[in-house]
Amino acid sequence: MAKLYFYYASMNAGKSTTLLQADFNYRERGMETMLWTAAFDDRAGVGKVASRIGLTAGSHLYEAATDIRHEVEEELKKRKLHCILVDEAQFLTRAQVVQLASICDELDIPVLAYGLRTDFQANLFEGSGALLALADNLVELKGICHCGRKATMNLRVDAEGNAVSEGASVEIGGNDRYVSLCRRHFMEKLAEANGEQLRLALTRTAAQG
């Protein structure tokens, strides 16, 4: 029976590189794949999965309203598929993760999903939470904090490199906006950011008074 895999990690842990290597391995053996990535992540160009080491591949795009199961079924009318690979899987909706599970269970096609586990506030993304609940296999890809410990958290920073603790959960960015840290250093940076915001708020209150 085909399985749903979730490969998760912090930023810069090689998720897209691993996906592209898996895609290459399938195609090298004459097998057909179908790649997917989030429509609004255009850092490498629209409709591309790209790694930091320069590997790229064309990809189908999904938005919140995309019926991935239906699109896969339409593709099956044209060619046989041996694997579905999904980049930026944290941006999937729960309904789309259920669709991926049904692709495994009912169409017997394995699905490999790659994404972040948590956002910059250490909250689960919708897609990641659903994948953690429904995937057959969970695989953690290791990133490294500056201290040498395993990086598990994603810290958002501003243009000056200062930690950001507030804002929208989804904000596309690379090394200019995010730093991968271990939990200890993530918590320290977040505490510093919250302390600075509190100081500014108190300063504004005092000035108004």
Image (spheres, helix red, strand yellow):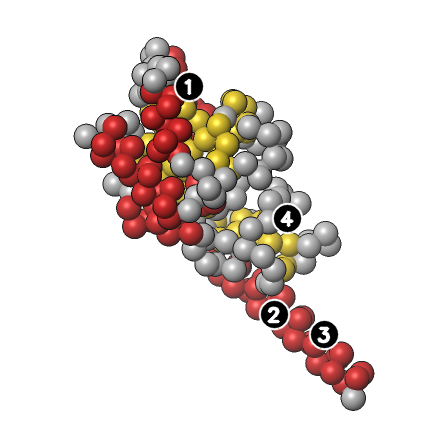
Q: Which mark is residue 59?
A: none
- Which residue position is annotated with label 2? 194
| The residue positioned farthest toward the top in the image shown | 30
Precedes in sequence: disc 3 or disc 2: 2
Q: CA gap, disc 3 to disc 4?
A: 22 Å
Residue, x 34% and y 18% (percent of image)? 77
Precedes in sequence: disc 3 or disc 4: 4
Residue, x 44% and y 27% (percent of image)? 35
Crowding at label 3, few (<14), some or many (≥20) Cα neighbours within 10 Å? few
- Which residue position is annotated with label 3? 200
Q: Work out whether 17 lies above or below 24.
A: below
Q: CA gap, disc 2 to disc 4?
A: 18 Å
- Which residue position is annotated with label 4? 177
Residue, x 50% and y 40% (percent of image)? 63
The answer to whether residue 59 is left or right of residue 140 is: right
> Element at badge 2?
helix
Precedes in sequence: disc 2 or disc 4: 4
Amino acid of disc 1: Phe
Amino acid of disc 2: Asn
Q: CA gap, disc 3 to disc 1?
A: 51 Å
Closest to the observer: 44 or 177?
44
Query: Is there CB contact under 8 Å for labels 2 and 4?
Result: no
Q: CA gap, disc 4 to disc 1?
A: 30 Å
Amino acid of disc 4: Arg
Residue 36 at least partly seen: yes
Precedes in sequence: disc 4 or disc 1: 1
Residue 186 horizontal/vertical position (percent): 53, 59
- Name the quadrant containing residue 45: top right
Residue, x 62% and y 44% (percent of image)? 173
- Which residue position is annotated with label 1? 24
The answer to whether residue 137 is left or right of residue 71 is: left
Q: Quadrant of the C terminus?
A: bottom right
